[in-house]
């Protein structure tokens, strides 16, 4: 992967300060001692961080991953990953998602219990916090339909089924799905990127007013 630095080291760095010359002592454990942005993002002035996120090759899994750049000056929720029918997310830890115009916190609890919390102070048309036991309910939905578990019938930012949480019996875990298995939502389901996520072909990420599509190119033998 080669970015603006012109260095084929398997790391691409996205930042917002073109005058920054890098900082010594990376804490990303990628073997790089000095980081310089490959791509400059047009961020709002108050989010003018030198480094926002990186994409790098992980030798252990032999795949590319995306990860927010972690520093004391970069702790805002500004990096989101879009879920699609080709990219569902196994729920292994607490995640913050954006569905429609509402933010939810989704947490896998003990004994295959799922907790979903509506974090918005407005648009509370349903119970703001619910738990679901996979032994009795294996599908949880958010959307405009009245029979959704979190129903927002008058909210035009939602599709009929905006987001589905489905329990995977084989792997014994909950999975986040945009829309339903049959149809994606109109506006998408976005996951706040707080940790490493595997990179999928045509993955879309968003940083404030920047939307980026990541494509994997097949190498010729």
Image (cartoon, grey):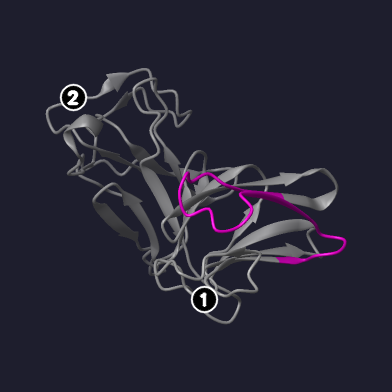
Q: Which residue is mark 1?
A: 160
Badge 1: how crowded within 10 Å, few (<14), some, or many (20+)? many
Q: Residue lying furthest bottom in this view?
A: 182
Callout 1 secondary element: loop
| Residue range (magenta) | 115-139
Q: Which residue is mark 2?
A: 21
Q: Residues within 10 Å of mark 2 (few under 14, many from 20)?
A: few
Residue 211 position (above or below residue 68): below
Q: Along the polypeptide, which appears first: circle 1 or circle 2?
A: 2
Please name the predominant secondary structure of the magenta segment in the image. loop
Q: Residue at x 36, y 28 (%)?
A: 74
Is 195 contained in the magenta span?
Answer: no
Q: Could you tell me if residue 213 is visible in this image? A: yes
The quarter of the picture where the C terminus appears is bottom left
Query: Outermost residue toward the top?
Result: 24
Q: Is residue 169 above or below residue 58?
A: below
Q: Residue at x 81, y 52 (%)?
A: 112
Q: Nearer the viewer, residue 100 or 210?
A: 100
- Residue 45 is left or right of residue 177, and the answer is left
Does the stretch in magenta take in 120? yes
């Amino acid at each position: 992967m080669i970015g603006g630095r012109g260095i084929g080291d398997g790391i691409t760095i996205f930042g917002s300060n073109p005058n920054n010359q890098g900082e010594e002592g990376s804490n990303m454990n990628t073997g790089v001692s000095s980081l310089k942005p490959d791509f400059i993002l047009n961020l709002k002035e108050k989010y003018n961080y030198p480094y926002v996120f990186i994409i790098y090759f992980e030798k252990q899994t032999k795949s590319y991953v995306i990860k927010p750049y972690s520093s004391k000056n970069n702790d805002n929720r500004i990096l989101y990953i879009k879920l699609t029918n080709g990219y569902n997310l196994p729920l292994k830890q607490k995640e913050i998602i954006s569905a429609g115009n509402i933010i939810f916190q989704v947490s896998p609890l003990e004994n295959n219990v799922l907790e979903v919390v509506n974090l918005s102070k407005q648009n509370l048309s349903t119970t703001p916090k619910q738990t679901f036991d996979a032994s009795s309910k294996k599908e949880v939905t958010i959307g405009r339909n009245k029979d959704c578990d979190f129903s927002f019938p008058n909210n035009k930012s939602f599709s009929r089924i905006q987001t589905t949480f489905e329990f995977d019996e084989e792997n014994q875990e909950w999975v986040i799905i945009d829309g339903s298995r049959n149809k994606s939502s109109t506006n998408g389901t976005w996951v706040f990127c707080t940790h490493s996520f595997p990179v999928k072909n045509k993955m879309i990420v968003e940083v404030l007013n920047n939307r980026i599509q990541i494509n994997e190119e097949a190498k010729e033998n």
